[in-house]
């Protein structure tokens, strides 16, 4: 099946509960708190995959981050402005619930649209505004240009998708330049993301020309249609 993040999860033996920047691990049988994890960041939601705990948190970048290119290029220097939302995935081993062990931590720029867990794979989707030179960062490093694709002709956001294998702890990240993402739906085999698309002035103008072409003499109508089809 497909699981969604919650502030409380159980595997029948323990219950994990999120509150502010903490996660409490509770023994179901003894009804006592085994340990409390201090995440240091506001917790968005939790997943449990066997003895693996996944914590999603959303801190903000407190100061501007200067991203330098690998080669000398003044125009290629990017500044991530303060206040940019960052999303962090914390993966803990709960084999000993009283002593959780951090297995990995992954950060990705953007606010959480949502996340899903299917079998052993975690999918995280974040949305990040385009502008001010900001680009998607994974663990503080710019995403490779080959991993970024344009979807909308006039995009306003980066829709970042991270897929994490919870057993091998390997991940891949791709970013799509779209409108602002708002809804996510997933089946065991497919991931669907809905985003807003604000009509452009040029789109309205093209639609108007197509309507006008129906009511003017054929010679001019055919030319207008020809121009529109040739962009």
Image: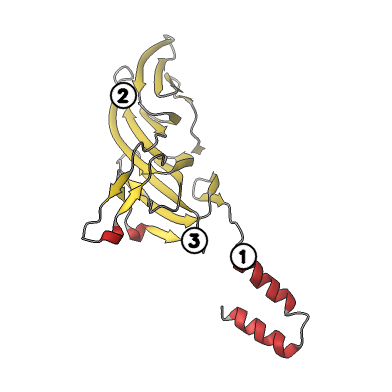
| Colour convention | secondary structure
Question: Which structural element holds mark 1?
Answer: helix
Q: Please identify the quarter of the rendering in which residue 21 is found.
A: top left
Q: Secondary structure at mark 2?
A: loop
Give above or below for 61 relative to 212.
Answer: above
Quarter residue 35 falls in = top left
Please indicate whether residue 102 sits to the left or right of residue 121 in the image.
left
Q: Residue at x 39, y 34 (%)?
A: 59
Task: Give the image location of residue 198, x and y in percent.
Answer: 60, 57
Tag 1 or tag 2, which sits nearer the N-term?
2
Determine which of the numbered discs, if any, sits on residue 201 in the image: 1
Position of residue 73 in the picture relative to residue 151 (left or right): left
Whole-percent x, y for residue 32 in the image: 41, 10
Q: Nearer the viewer, residue 202 or 43?
A: 202
Residue 182 lies, with reference to residue 59, above or below; the image says: below
Q: Quadrant of the C terminus?
A: bottom right
* Quarter assignment of residue 184: top right
Mark 3 secondary-structure assignment? loop
- Which sits in the foreground, 120 or 79? 79
**Which of disc 3 and disc 2 is earlier in sequence?**
2
Question: Which disc, if any, is residue 151?
Answer: 3
Mark nearest the camera among 2 and 3 is 3
Q: Which residue is mark 2?
A: 95
Q: Gap between marks 2 and 3, in whole Å?
A: 42 Å
Q: Nearer the viewer, residue 97 or 193?
A: 193
């Amino acid at each position: 099946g497909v699981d969604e993040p919650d502030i409380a999860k159980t595997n029948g033996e323990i219950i994990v509960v999120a509150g502010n920047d903490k996660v409490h691990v509770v023994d179901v049988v003894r009804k006592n708190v085994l340990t409390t994890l201090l995440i240091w960041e506001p917790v968005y939601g939790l997943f449990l995959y066997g003895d693996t705990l996944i914590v999603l948190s959303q801190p903000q970048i407190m100061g501007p981050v200067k991203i330098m290119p690998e080669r000398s290029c003044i125009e290629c220097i990017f500044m991530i402005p303060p206040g940019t939302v960052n999303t962090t995935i914390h993966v803990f081993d709960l084999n000993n619930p009283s002593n959780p062990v951090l297995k990995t931590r992954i950060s990705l720029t953007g606010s959480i649209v949502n996340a899903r867990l299917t079998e052993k794979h975690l999918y995280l989707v974040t949305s990040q505004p385009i502008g001010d030179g900001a680009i998607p960062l994974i663990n503080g490093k710019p995403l490779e240009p080959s991993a970024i694709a344009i979807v909308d002709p006039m995009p306003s956001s980066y829709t970042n998708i991270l897929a994490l294998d919870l057993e091998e702890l390997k991940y891949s990240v791709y970013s799509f330049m779209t409108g602002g993402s708002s809804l996510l739906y997933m089946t065991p085999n497919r991931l669907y993301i809905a985003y807003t698309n604000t009509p452009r002035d040029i789109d309205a103008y093209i639609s108007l020309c197509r309507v006008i072409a129906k009511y003017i003499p054929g010679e001019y109508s055919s030319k207008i249609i020809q121009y529109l089809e040739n962009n």
